[in-house]
Image (spheres, coloured by chain):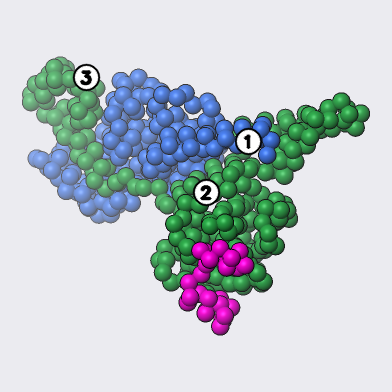
Chain colours: A blue, B green
Amino acid sequence: MSAASQAATTASNAKQKDFEREAVPHMDVLYNYALRMTGNEDDASDLLQETYLKAYRFWDKYEKGTNIRAWLFRIMKNSYINRYRKESKEPDTVDYDEVKNFYNTIRHESVDPNDLQERLFGNLLEDDVAEALESLPEDFKTVVILCDIEGFTYEEIAEFVECPIGTVRSRLHRGRKMLQAKLFDFARKHGYIGRD
Amino acid sequence: MDCREALDYVSAVIDGEVGAEKRKEFDGHVTTCPSCRSEFETEAMIKRLIGGKLSAVKAPDDLRISILQQVHAGFPTRNDERTGIEKFLSKVFLRPFLKPVLALGVVAVIAIVGISLFGRRESEPIPSTSATADMVDQAVEHYSHYLQGGVNLQLVSSNHEKVRNFFKDKVAYDVYVPDVEHAELIGGVLCEHEGVKFLNLVFKTGDKVVYFYTGCSKEMKASGKVGLCAKAESDLQNTGWYFDTTHTNCSVAVWKEGDRVCSAVADMKQGELLALLKEEK
């Protein structure tokens, strides 16, 4: 073996080890995000694979000491956008009037609306919640997944999605409200809630 | 705090992302404003619901393994780009009229061209880490090690001929590279136990790895230290096959090809593995 190829091999082994130590421990978090974004395991697997192979390919672009999770996350987000924006179904829009109406409905339904909601929504299945979440527009879906499932701090989320903390806060607020409206629909369809 | 500000901070309060001061203001507001209070309680309920119904899941093991394998199999990296340039440069320098001048350089370049053209990614053989003298245990050990990303292949290639030629001069027996239908050759690496050389070959079928581990029976005998268990020897004598039952996470099949003792390890049922191997014969 020539010295040059030996050196190349050593470098490539070092890179592999580095990559494994730094990037591989975050696979679960990223898979989870992919799963909630796409709503199915096959797409999530494809997305995770694409993300890691890209990350490996561009490993020398990763700045040591910076947030590796945020870096991987951005690769995944871009991959997601490239994949799913192309097929571009318009992102689901949420009818805010409907949300408002729902509030009024809920408010008038019971003296203790929150307790009622909690009981009604408690009947929803995991699949209903996953589907409702998946149907949210991307920006809102992302912050809800990162905050409510992954348990990240606002600061971390802000770094991931590259926006100010105030935006994280307002997206979370709106995202959860949209979810509430969707879940209310599901609950009504499944007969957990009567029509008015 | 007015309603507008309170609504702006609802999420942050729920997520514990406000300072004590703001929290106090917020609490002060919602005790007097039922509408904001309801907003707060509803959003908190939605958060509880999401966290309660959708738990964080783990990436499936086979996916994890498959990604690691691709990284190990040398998914195109910047190093490959470099060998591409090396390839180009060496072609230029290989022009006959330059040969006398660059005689020494050419020797080095030929080596590089050879390596890059054949996609060789040489590394040292696996060091003998196994303490066991049983060939089957070694095979399983290397297989698991490979799945965990601990084995670097000396040669990554799906070309059987190249793999055969690459290892031909490195062992004293005929190199055995099986043709397994529906399975793709990934590459191979040599290892040594007690002076006995074993060829490790990796195949992939679907998302599963079939790991071939082959040694020479004469070498094993001569070493007196590595071999098969008595049950394996007698089964091979009687039926031509031996199936290991001591490993629960994978199936192992052993058979002989002339001087060579071959074993195949895979995470599949014994019947499936046998079907693959029979296809090959």
Name the subunit of mark 2.
Answer: B
Q: Secondary structure at mark 3?
A: helix
Magenta-tinted stretch: B217-241
C-alpha gap between disc 1 and disc 3: 65 Å
Mark 3 is surrounded, within 10 Å at the Cα level, by few (under 14), some (14 to 19) or many (20 or more) other residues, namely few
Answer whether labels 1 and 3 touch (C-beta < 8 Å). no
Residue under the image location 42 percent in, 34 percent down: A22
- Residue B274 location, quadrant: bottom right
Foreground: disc 3 or disc 2: 2
Residue B279 picture location, percent across and down: 64, 71
Main secondary structure type of the part rendered in magenta = helix
What's under tag 2, amino acid-wise? Answer: Pro
Q: Secondary structure at mark 2?
A: loop
Residues marked 1 and 3, same chain: no
Viewed as shown, does residue B160 lie left or right of B106?
A: left
The first of marks 3 and 2 along the sequence is 3
- Who is closer to the viewer here, A150 or A55? A55
Residue under the image location 52 percent in, 34 percent down: A14
Viewed as shown, does residue B176 lie left or right of A46?
A: right
Q: Which residue is mark 1?
A: A6
Foreground: disc 1 or disc 3: 1
Q: Is any atom of residue A185 visible in this view?
A: no
Q: Which residue is mark 3?
A: B4
Residue B134 picture location, percent across and down: 48, 65
